[in-house]
Every structure is written in C-alpha cells, then in structure tokens.
Image (tube, rainbow, N blue to C red):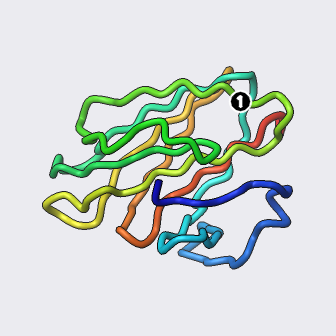
Amino acid sequence: NNINFVLVKPYEEIVSELVVNGSETATLIKSEDKRKVLITNEIPVSGDTIDVDIYDGSIIDGDTISVFYYGKKLLDKVKITEKPINIKLVLNKGEVTHLLVLQAENLGSIPPNTGVMVVYDAFSRHEVFFSNSLQVSTGVIFTKGAR
C-alpha cells in the first residue's frame, strides 16, 4: 500500500494547505510516504450507501489506478476505460466524513493519469474529474448528513 493516512479529526482540522486553481479550491493533505493526497472535492451525500462509477473520460490510453477507502485498497491496478467500473460504498454510520483516494499506478501513454468519477447517492449525481501523477493522488471527501 503506497498511501498511509489516518482521518481522525474533523475535516476542518486536517486541512494543511489551501491551493486555489481558478474558482475551485482544493486541499493538500500530506501522507507519510512519498505520495500526497490532493482533496479536490467535498461532496455532501445522503443515505447509508453511495455508488461510484470510474471511467476514462477522454482518450483511452491505458491509465491504471488503485482505489482506497479508509486506507483499505478496494481496487488494485485496474485499467480505466470508457466502460465504468462500479463501486458501492457503505458509509460508516459513526463517521461524518469519508475519504476516497484514487491513486495512479501508471500514466498511460498520454500523461497524466486522468479520468472521471460519477457519484450517486439517494438523491443526486456528482461528477469529479481527476488528474493524478505518480507523486500526487486525488482524494474526495464525502460528507454524510450535510444536506
């Protein structure tokens, strides 16, 4: 496992640095290893489960990713294509914030490693475009009960 992080405090307390890119604000959380996790989105969700579809939203060039939830590897070195890879996440009842990390395992034939993640909860749909390097992974925080 190339990512080592612990989410033990409320989201506001773990923010280490703000990076502004156009109108979008992102948060950089440093992990213990060489990789960093760039939090690009905070998505409010409803319900106890969410569905996540991950696919290559552009040119299919052989990008491979691994996906982590609560530090546990859910997907290991899977190739993303135009066909969505579906993950159903059960949100821990005792937690308000939930961190999902998308880690590049290669850069494909056209760097960087890019794709789209579509998140469905009980009432809504959210799109997250990600772009990873071999040094920085994309993180998305789901905030339960934030509606």
Picture quadrant where residue 117 is located: top left
Asked if residue 55 lies left or right of residue 146, the reply is left
* Residue located at (24% from left, 62% from top): 107
Residue at (75, 28) in percent of width and height: 46
Q: Nearer the viewer, residue 112 or 123?
A: 112
Q: Residue at left 60%, top 70%?
A: 32
Q: As drawn, is 14 to the left or to the right of 72? A: right
In this rendering, position of residue 84 left or right of residue 79: right
Q: Which amino acid type is marked by label 1?
A: Leu
**Secondary structure under the numbered disc 1 in the rendered image:** loop
Residue under label 1: 91
Q: Position of residue 15 (x, y in %)?
A: 75, 70
The percent position of residue 111, horizontal first and vertical second, equals: 23, 67
Query: Could you say where residue 59 lies in the image, as x and y percent from the top left?
Result: 18, 50
- Closer to us: 117 or 29: 29
- Residue count near mark 1 (Cα–Cα under 10 Å), binned few <14, some 14–19, many ≥20: some
Please, which residue is most extreme toward the front here?
A: 1
Q: Quadrant of the C terminus?
A: top right
Q: Nearer the viewer, residue 79 or 50?
A: 79
Tell how many labels.
Answer: 1
Q: Is residue 131 left or right of residue 44?
A: left
